[in-house]
Image (cartoon, rainbow, N blue to C red):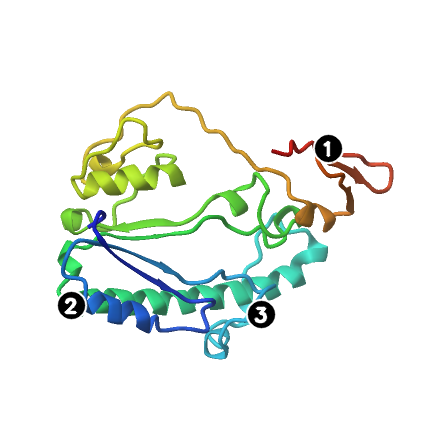
Amino acid sequence: MIKSKNSGRATTPSPKAVAPQNSSKNLQKMHNPFSSLFHGGHPMTHTIQPPHQYQELYDKSTIKIPENVPGKHQNQAREQLHGYYSHISALDDCLKTILRSLKKNNLDDKTIVVFTSDHGDMIFSHGLTRKLFPFEESVRVPLVIRDPGSKHRAGQQCNAPIDAPDLMPTLLGLANLKQEDHVQGKDWSTTIRGKKPEKSSDAGLLSAPVQAGPLQLYGISLSRRAHKPAHLCAQRKRSLAFIRQHQ
């Protein structure tokens, strides 16, 4: 269910907290409609190493490197992918704990579960790292929905372009709750439950505001003045102007 006075939130700072025990305890108390968020931490090996037992699941020498990773970056990509996959396996175990808790508390047949992410990671594809780039490695994210009302459609896939603003109206639709007219995003609940997607003339807009930190990784220096536009000047005779309007 989606809307309720009761709300449970379970978070872990990293996959080191493999079993989200707080989430399990909270679920025992949730017999009224609820919305619960579990944030499993970011699978980023440049910020934290995955638990050792998950690192042992993957042999670095057998990890396949994407074809668009330049040769000079392939060793680095292999190292990061090893950590990335290890983190993902840790998160898989976190998800198992949550699903088992739902079943134990007789909530699995009336709880919609969504697994998704806010962004991907380049991991040296095209020679780039992290996010903020208009490539599939950075932009495309997983979106898996476990809907008790669509058990007969388990394993079905939808190729329509779905974006983060669509999540809220879709969840409202699955929960049979009213959606206000001013809400942005598209309700895909009928598609999830078997209806063929309607043809749409909607256009996609990718907005990637430039941040100083990632730009500095690629040789771009930053100078700022308070209450005035900020200008970014690249080294080696390359230039890039970025204007930020201070509010």
- Name the secondary structure under disc 2: loop
Which residue in the structure is indicated by mark 2? Answer: 105
Q: CA distance from mark 2 to mark 3?
A: 43 Å
Q: Residue at position x 69%, y 57% from top?
A: 73
Residue 40 tag number: none
How far across and down, in percent of the image, does residue 22 sit? 31, 71
Q: Quadrant of residue 74?
A: bottom right
Q: Secondary structure at mark 3?
A: helix
Which amino acid, mark 3? Ser
Mark 1 → mark 2, Cα distance in angstroms: 56 Å
Disc nearest the viewer among 2 and 3: 2
Determine the residue positioned at 34% across, 23% down.
200
Q: Is residue 87 left or right of residue 48?
A: left
For badge 1, the amino acid type reads Lys
Residue indicated by mark 3: 61
> CB atoms at circles 1 and 2 under 8 Å apart?
no
Query: Which quarter of the rendered picture does the C terminus lie within?
Result: top right
Q: Decide: few, some or many residues near mark 2? Use Cα within 10 Å; few <14, some 14-19, many ≥20.
A: some
Q: Who is closer to the viewer here, 246 or 48?
A: 246
Q: Position of residue 161 (x, y in %)?
A: 39, 35
Residue linked to disc 1: 228
Q: Residues within 10 Å of mark 1 (few under 14, many from 20)?
A: few
- Relative to 232, is 237 on the left or the right? right
